[in-house]
Amino acid sequence: MDRPELGLQQLHAFTVLAEELHFGRAAERLGIAQPPLSQQIRRLEVKVGHPLFTRGPGRVALTPAGNELLPAALRALDEVAVGLDAARRVGSGAAGRIRIGFSASLALTLLPGLLSAHRDRCPGVDLEIREMTTAPQVTALREHVIDIGLLREPPDEPGLSTETILSEEFVVVLPAAHPLAARRVVPVEALADEPLVLLPRSAGPTVHSRILDLCHDAGFEPRLGQQAVEWQTVCALVEAGLGVSLAPASIRRIRLTGVAYRRIEPNTARTTVAMAWRHDDRNPLVSRFLETVRGAS
């Protein structure tokens, strides 16, 4: 059996007339003349197959069929209103879900403030956070697994837009008992005989190369030791005495009692953090998050 298609305009006219029980007052509330209102009610009655109102001189009343339809009509109009509001909120970027990738070191610096600012600005948006290094973030953006990447040293990747939000210096990470930890500033060349604990090149090619360039500029070929895919693990390996590391300054927030962080000399190299997104992404949730980041930078 085919279901009748009831127009929202007709249902709205029906509910207003059911409240007023007067064609003149109902037409005034609806902002239309009485004849168009009467036509809408008659069309609805044709679809129902029965009169919805009894009409008499100066008197309008709901029929049993009208009484039966009224609660359903009110529910339908309310559900549509709720749906329209939800659609508007999602369309404006005020509601929905956004997936954000982030480099682990940002959890110690930028990330908490950015997430807090965006939750204050868009409380209806669900934030899905995924920790991953730079290369996996680029892949996840290409494959639509995440919507925004907060990553270190983003590559020049076709189809992605990037914007730098932070530039920071490098520091040396030393075991607390290491002789160089007694210095306030450590010359990079003093690390020539030390095994370097680093992230693998595959996790962040640019920052990996930048660290090696620091060593080359200081006149030595670094001794590459253990590798770890997260900076916290790098620091733990240094604490265990497996080597030293050169790392972004933000990792100084990783508090390990057996680790010392010192500035380096020369102190000219920088590592950048950027946000990245698909340049053809028209998702308003992405635009709103980019605005939050720009406002906080």
Image: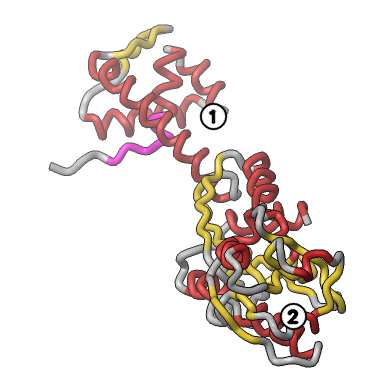
Amino acid identity at mark 1:
Ile
Q: Quadrant of the N terminus?
A: top left
Q: Nearer the viewer, residue 284 or 55?
A: 284
Indicate which disc, 2 or 1, sits on the residue closer to the N terminus.
1
Residue 6 in the magenta stretch? The answer is yes
Q: Which residues are magenta?
A: 5-11
Element marked by disc 2:
helix
Q: Nearer the viewer, residue 275 or 195?
A: 195
Q: Quadrant of residue 199?
A: bottom right
Return the residue at label 2: 191
Amino acid identity at mark 2:
Leu
Asked if residue 174 can be seen in this view, the reply is yes
Q: Position of residue 177 (x, y in %)?
A: 71, 63
Q: Quadrant of the C terminus?
A: bottom right
Element marked by disc 1:
loop
The answer to whether residue 211 is above or below residue 174 is: below
Residue sitting at 65 percent across and 46 percent down?
Answer: 118
Residue sitting at 45 percent across and 65 percent down?
Answer: 145
Return the residue at label 1: 32
State yes or no: discs 2 and 1 in contact (Cβ < 8 Å): no
In the shown orientation, is residue 106 left or right of residue 168? left
Q: Position of residue 210 (x, y in %)?
A: 71, 82
Label 2 neighbour load within 10 Å: few <14, some 14-19, many 20+: many
Q: Residue furthest top?
A: 58
The answer to whether residue 5 is above or below residue 193 is: above
Residue 49 in the magenta stretch? The answer is no
In the shown orientation, is residue 140 left or right of residue 45? right
Q: Nearer the viewer, residue 40 or 218?
A: 218
Label 1 neighbour load within 10 Å: few <14, some 14-19, many 20+: few
Labelled disc at residue 261? none
